């Protein structure tokens, strides 16, 4: 039998049916992956407490499985590291629930930088998304690695922001599906971009579909990779709150962005603040928490064209409220047509955003 | 033994003249109707028999054949009952053929021998208006819509036979005349606030642009839509006539009046395909689309309509007519209406982004029911938000319908003079001539095209709406950038809320 590299056996073990993180860790703990694979091929049962049907399923994975997974990893450009390997992220080595095998796309060296997790709801407000983008951009410019989940809403915006900076630190995206299975599908461009500039990390082998149970599990890796976890917007229950719990288990500092009372997208973050989390009211707060900045320094932000005088008047009139066109016209004492035109121009420049007829200013 | 009587049958919204041939011959007693009759025609036999006997006339106990000669179409309705009865009487030589030579008969018969109106009296009478038309007394008013030169209304078959045999005088119908009414349409002044929506409504009326309103319940979508007919100009005589004919053909409402205000149709979302575009199993009836012709078709809760029904609207809206093709026949009906639709932004309908609990997925699923090509038909697509309490309680009412209607009429006049059609109907080739853009406007549009915010079709539609906006503000030549930008702001994207990264 030809000998495959060690990573191929790691990948094969990780992608066996009925595999769980705990079982995988125990298997990898037995010794070199090639050796463990051989034991399974010889119908040995080197672990206790594993049900019979699992053993049977594992032992029925023949050479075809091994070669199939290996080829899949190669064709998807995915590298495989186990806790025993040199390339395994140091930060996860001490993690009690660290995944035994990681599938990576991109450059995992970005994890050697300072790391901040940015998480939040998929149902974010326009301003929440804008804040996540600004935060991502400022952190990347300071050489901080943004860790998030590439989900809709806050997650993806933080990545967009991080990559909007030239020469910024590449972000890390911890995803629940296989690193080659784009989910949600409208994010296919940014997946490729993260793999190019930063690193896509997954516990799941290539080809794994995003089953619901994988998302909470993915959140523990985000928590484990972060030094500081920032919750931008979150409902009182949701994936972000799972990440927060995982972070607290690991003594990771959790910070939250306050929101208006009664807004569903901010209920969770406001709860966190009440429970004693540090607030983030501007981007600098996070940099201060990392010890990277002082209050008087200027913070990098996403560039946009300056607003003209009449446009600035509109921004001032809108303040931080959600306004309809009619309200904007009323507040700025403009005819409706004029207000609509100015809002259109501001939107094109990226100063305001519209959702369902409501306009919000994108000013932190 | 043989007789030929003129009558008419309904094809969609138009009547078609036919000849009812009756033959009474020797043989085993039987009654056969040939010539593509539908079920209603076949039932004539029993009605005619009972009516003849009730009127003290004789039913020929011989072999009777009725042929509905004329078009190759399927004939429907009970309007030929009277013609069949007269045919039998002529064939039996009770009535002399010369007495009915220049006449046409359109009425349903009751079992007691009374004459009754049937659906579509106006178009039916119109089809045979070269002749003296005999209808039921109660159908005279509706028949008058077709303005036939000679019209007789009689109450019963007996009465009619008396006139035809004994040369009695026709019953008097002079006191019937066409009633012209104006429907009461709610006034736009009742709408408080909603300045941008009012503007959009005026644009829709001025250029005949189809309009979609997306907004939470209580934002006033229906309220605005119901006021739209009041902004459109009164119907011309021809248009009013067409509308009345369609209504008569559909057999709805009081067919006795001609309304000069544009029709407003608001079908419930459970409407079937046949009821929307026209059709039906036996004979083809006009649908809501035709009933709204020259007026407004309002689809409230557009998301609840069956997707097939919505998609069936696309072609008629473009062409202004709806064609129903069947194996035996093909019927064309008017469908030149202004479509205005309303929908909630998401299943929960909370309205404000901060209050909405719907997931993106739920929202997408809700709005994905509208096909892209259908959404493309809406030149004006606006978001509506609930008016603030300040607006609702403020004392100052908005402009009244009359004031706005005057401006709308002006834009209609200007655009008809300039290009012979309303602004929404400007062809793509004509656009450069009649809707030239200023340099700024061109740059702005080019930028939107480059950024991918605008499709090629959207580009033309924006230019048409911008033309209307400029016309509304008295600028009939080159279109300034301002109007193009406003037009773009009135074409919000409804479905693409997923952000592509």
Image (cartoon, coloured by chain):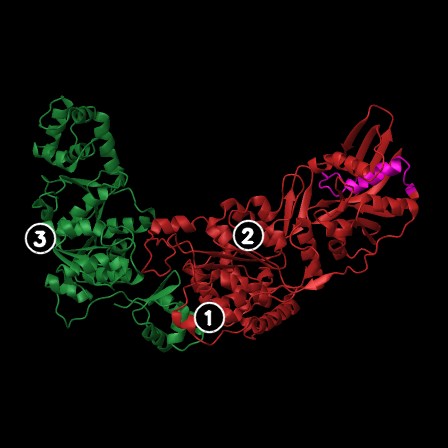
Chain colours: A green, B red
Q: Are marks 3 and 1 on the same chain?
A: no
Q: Left or right? Give the position of A138 relative to B354.
A: left
Closest to the camera, between mark 3 and mark 1, is: 1
Q: Are marks 2 and 1 in contact (CB under 8 Å)?
A: no
Q: Where does residue A211 sit, x and y in percent of width and height?
A: 26, 40
Q: Residue at x 21, y 63 (%)?
A: A258
Magenta stretch: give its range.
B70-97
Q: Left or right? Give the position of A362 relative to A46.
A: right
Q: Are marks 3 and 2 in contact (CB under 8 Å)?
A: no
Q: CA distance from mark 2 to mark 1?
A: 26 Å
Q: Look at the image and tell me in which quarter the C terminus of chain A lies.
A: bottom left
Asked whether B224 or A363 is in front, the reply is B224
Q: Where does residue A268 sit, x and y in percent of width and height?
A: 21, 56
Q: Which mark is residue B267?
A: 2
Q: Where does residue B312 sit, x and y in percent of width and height?
A: 56, 47
Q: Residue at x 89, y 33 (%)?
A: B1
Q: Which residue corresponds to mark 3?
A: A251
Provide the secondary structure element on which disc 2 rests: loop
Rendered image quadrant of residue A323: bottom left
Q: Chain of mark 1?
A: B
Q: CA distance from mark 3 to mark 2?
A: 61 Å
Q: Which residue corresponds to mark 1?
A: B192
Q: Left or right? Give the position of A319 relative to B456.
A: left
Q: Chain of mark 3?
A: A
Q: Look at the image and tell me in which quarter the N terminus of chain A lies.
A: top left
Q: Where does residue B334 sit, x and y in percent of width and height?
A: 65, 53
Rendered image quadrant of residue B217: bottom left
């Amino acid at each position: 039998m030809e000998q495959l590299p060690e990573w191929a056996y790691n990948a094969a073990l990780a992608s066996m049916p009925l595999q769980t993180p705990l079982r995988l860790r125990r298997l990898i703990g037995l010794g070199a992956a090639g050796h463990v694979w051989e034991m399974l091929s010889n119908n040995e049962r080197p672990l206790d407490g594993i049900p019979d049907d699992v053993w049977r399923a594992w032992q029925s994975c023949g050479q075809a499985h091994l070669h199939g997974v290996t080829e899949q990893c190669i064709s998807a450009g995915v590298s495989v590291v186990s806790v025993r390997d040199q390339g395994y992220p140091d930060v996860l080595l001490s993690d009690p629930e660290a995944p035994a095998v990681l599938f990576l796309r991109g450059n995992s060296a970005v994890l050697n930088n300072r790391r901040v997790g940015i998480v939040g709801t998929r149902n974010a407000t326009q301003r929440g998304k804008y804040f996540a983008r600004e935060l991502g951009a400022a952190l990347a410019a300071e050489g901080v690695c943004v860790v998030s989940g590439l989900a809709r809403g806050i997650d993806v915006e933080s990545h967009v922001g991080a990559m909007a900076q030239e020469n910024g630190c590449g972000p890390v995206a911890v995803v629940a599906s296989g690193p080659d299975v784009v989910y949600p599908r409208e994010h296919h461009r940014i997946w490729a971009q993260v793999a190019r500039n930063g690193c896509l990390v997954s516990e799941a082998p290539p080809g794994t579909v995003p089953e619901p149970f994988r998302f909470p599990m993915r959140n523990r890796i985000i928590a484990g990779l972060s030094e500081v976890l920032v919750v931008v917007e979150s409902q009182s229950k949701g994936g972000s709150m799972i990440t927060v719990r995982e972070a607290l288990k690991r003594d990771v500092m959790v910070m939250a962005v306050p929101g208006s009372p009664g807004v569903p997208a901010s209920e969770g973050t406001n709860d966190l603040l009440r429970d004693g989390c540090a607030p983030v009211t501007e981007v600098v707060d996070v940099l201060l928490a990392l010890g990277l900045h002082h209050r008087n320094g200027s913070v990098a932000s996403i560039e946009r064209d300056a607003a003209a005088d009449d446009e600035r008047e509109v921004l001032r009139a809108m303040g931080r409220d959600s306004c309809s066109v009619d309200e904007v016209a009323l507040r700025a004492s403009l005819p409706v047509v004029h207000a609509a035109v100015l809002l259109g121009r501001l939107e094109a420049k990226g100063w305001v955003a519209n959702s369902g007829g409501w306009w919000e200013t994108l000013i932190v | 033994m043989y007789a030929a009587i003129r009558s008419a049958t309904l094809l969609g919204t138009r009547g078609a003249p036919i000849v009812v041939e009756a033959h009474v011959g020797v043989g085993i007693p039987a009654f056969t109707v040939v010539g593509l009759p539908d079920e209603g025609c076949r039932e004539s036999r029993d009605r005619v028999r009972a009516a003849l006997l009730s009127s003290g006339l004789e039913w020929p106990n011989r072999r009777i054949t009725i042929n509905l000669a004329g078009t190759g179409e399927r004939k429907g309705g009970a309007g030929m009952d009277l013609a069949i009865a007269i045919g039998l009487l002529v064939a039996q030589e009770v009535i002399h053929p010369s007495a009915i030579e220049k006449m046409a008969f359109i009425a349903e018969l009751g079992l007691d021998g009374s004459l009754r109106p049937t659906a579509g009296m106006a178009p039916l009478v119109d089809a045979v208006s070269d002749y003296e038309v005999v209808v039921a007394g109660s159908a005279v008013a509706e028949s008058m819509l077709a303005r036939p030169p000679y019209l007789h209304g009689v109450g019963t078959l007996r009465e009619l036979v008396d006139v035809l045999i004994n040369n009695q005088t026709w019953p008097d119908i002079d006191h019937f005349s066409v009633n012209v009414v104006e429907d009461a349409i709610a006034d736009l002044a009742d709408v408080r606030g909603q300045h941008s929506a009012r503007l959009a409504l005026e644009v829709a009326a001025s250029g005949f642009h189809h309009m979609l309103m997306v907004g939470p319940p209580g934002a006033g979508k229906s309220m605005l839509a119901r006021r739209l007919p009041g902004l459109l100009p009164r119907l011309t005589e021809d248009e009013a006539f067409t509308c009345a004919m369609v209504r008569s053909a559909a057999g709805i409402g009081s067919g006795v009046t001609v309304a000069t205000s544009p029709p407003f149709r608001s079908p419930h979302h459970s409407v079937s395909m046949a009821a929307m575009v026209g059709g039906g199993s036996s004979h083809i009836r006009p649908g809501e689309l035709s009933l709204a012709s020259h007026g407004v078709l309002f689809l409230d809760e557009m998301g609840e309509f069956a997707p097939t029904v919505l998609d069936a609207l696309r072609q008629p809206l473009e062409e202004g007519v709806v064609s129903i093709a069947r194996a035996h026949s093909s019927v064309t009906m008017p469908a030149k209406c202004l479509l205005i639709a309303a929908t909630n932004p998401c299943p929960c309908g909370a309205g404000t982004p901060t209050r909405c609990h719907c997931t993106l997925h739920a929202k997408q699923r809700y709005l994905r029911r509208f096909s892209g090509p259908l959404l493309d038909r809406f030149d004006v697509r606006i978001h509506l938000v609930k008016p603030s309490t300040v607006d609702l309680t403020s004392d100052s009412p908005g402009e009244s319908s009359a004031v706005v209607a005057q401006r709308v009429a002006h834009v209609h006049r200007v655009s008809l003079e300039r290009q012979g059609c309303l602004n929404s109907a400007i062809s793509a080739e004509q656009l450069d001539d009649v809707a030239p853009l200023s340099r700024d406007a061109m740059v702005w549009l080019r930028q939107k095209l480059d950024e991918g915010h605008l499709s090629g079709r959207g580009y033309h539609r924006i230019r048409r709406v911008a033309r209307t906006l400029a016309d509304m503000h008295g600028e009939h030549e080159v279109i300034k950038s301002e109007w193009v930008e406003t037009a773009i702001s009135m074409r919000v994207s409804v479905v693409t809320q997923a952000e592509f990264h």
